[in-house]
Amino acid sequence: MSAGNEPKWWSVCITGGASGIGLHLAKMMLANGSDVAIFDIYISDEAKLELEKAKIKEAQKISLHSVDVRDAAAILSAVNEASCHIGQPDLALNVAGIQLAKTFDELSAEEFERVVSINLFGSRNFSAAVLPLMTKGSQLAFVASLAGLVPNYTYAAYCSSKFGVVALAGVLRQEYIAKGIYVSVICPPEIDTPLVMEELKTMHPVTKELKSLAGNISLEQACSEILASLHKHTFLIIPGFMARLTYWLNRIVPIKLFNILVNNIILKTLAKQQKH
């Protein structure tokens, strides 16, 4: 919040804002007095009610748009429509994404393409829609994943897409800094969201063991750390101490030693699984 209890961001656009991280961030923005536009494939009545309850002033605007981020023309139209309602975005958050955890030999070409098209192409489409509307001092942020920095078992499609999002954010940071537009990329570890809870039901034991290295954080902690870092215009945002430690170990420790550690976890876990 800025001086005089005015919101830092007056107008906020959020994809994937009808559930999980996106919904929680949207409610935090509304609680800070911002006007918010939500873009999601489906927006439930429950989510609409939660958003309305998060407002602190009756005059605050909420603009809702059911749209698929894979459709470049549709997201462009929706963003332009939203900007007419709540104004040009001061903050644009791309949170929309999906996860599909399968070993590579089980993953079809269609499944791989679907994950990449939503996570990576969706990020591209949202960026192309909001950036022409953004002015000096505004901020674009992508929710990627720690899996966009450190690979993980059964995450061929997901890691590929999120590594791509991190790279996209890095290029946009360079290209838009001269215009005074800040770009951030958020790489959280496992967070207690509906997506993660669903994944846990069928998560491969090796995936679970490797993910445990980075720890698990609550939705509240993740979003609080994300907003604090966005306020500082931090480029790479990794909520959670263990997640940051995992990232730095992956960068500092020689890749051969890091791979030995990972290999041991994989082989031991697979051996235990075969015994059962």
Image (cartoon, rainbow, N blue to C red):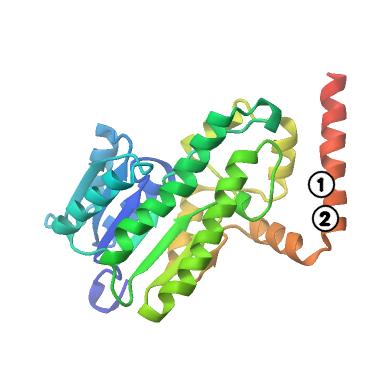
Of the residues shown, which amino acid type is indicated by label 1? Val
**Position above or below: 107 against 49:** above
Residue 48: percent from left, percent from top: 24, 39
The residue depicted at 39 percent of the width and 48 percent of the height is 22
Q: Quadrant of the N terminus?
A: bottom left
Question: Foreground: 49 or 149?
Answer: 149
Q: Quadrant of the C terminus?
A: top right
Q: Residue furthest top?
A: 276
Of the residues shown, which amino acid type is indicated by label 2? Phe
Callout 2: few (<14), some (14-19), or many (20+) C-alpha neighbours within 10 Å? some
Does residue 8 appear to the left or right of 177 in the view shown? left
Callout 1: few (<14), some (14-19), or many (20+) C-alpha neighbours within 10 Å? some
Residue 16 in view: yes
Question: Foreground: 67 or 265?
Answer: 67
Q: Which residue is mark 1?
A: 262
Q: Which residue is mark 2?
A: 258
Mark 1 touches mark 2? (CB < 8 Å): yes
Q: Residue furthest left?
A: 59
Does residue 83 appear to the left or right of 211 in the view shown? left
Q: Secondary structure at mark 2?
A: helix
Residue 223: percent from left, percent from top: 45, 55
Q: Secondary structure at mark 1?
A: helix
Does residue 85 appear to the left or right of 156 in the view shown? left
